[in-house]
Image (tube, helix red, strand yellow):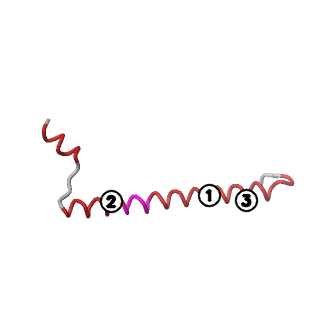
Amino acid sequence: MIDLGPHAAFIWASYAIYALVLAGVIGWLVWDGARLKARLAALDARGVSRRSRAAAKES
């Protein structure tokens, strides 16, 4: 194993905090993406369409 010297606890704690923050960001992105998909599906069910689709149909 690698000898990290007297700062081993700080180094391992830094890696652990980084991993937790990264997992939190990834989890938040997955949750937010699902939430936005549900909102878009609800709008689509109500008949609201995007302006970009209308512009594409006119071209």
The picture places residue 59, in percent across and down from the top left corner, at: 14, 35
Give residue 5's position: percent from left, percent from top.
85, 52
In this rendering, position of residue 35 left or right of residue 6: left
Disc 1 from disc 2: Cα separation: 27 Å
Q: Position of residue 4 (x, y in %)?
A: 81, 52
Front label number (3 vs 2): 2
Q: Is residue 21 left or right of residue 50?
A: right
Identify which residue is drawn at 42% across, 60% down: 32
The residue type indicated by label 3 comes to: Ala
User: Which portion, as a residue range, is magenta?
Assistant: 30-35
Tell me the kind of residue under disc 1.
Ala
Find the distance from the CA under tag 3 to the CA under tag 2: 36 Å
Q: For mark 1, what is the residue?
A: 19
Return the residue at label 3: 13
Earlier-in-chain disc, 1 versus 3: 3
Q: Which mark is in front, 1 or 2?
A: 2
Indicate left or right for 57 with 2 as reference: left
Which residue is denoted by mark 2 in the rendering?
37
Comparing 24 with 49, the one in front is 49
Specify the farthest residue to the top: 59
- Residue 50 in the image: state x and y as whole percent: 23, 50
User: Which residue is pictured at 31% across the width and 63% down the height?
Assistant: 38
Q: Are marks 1 and 2 in contact (CB under 8 Å)?
A: no
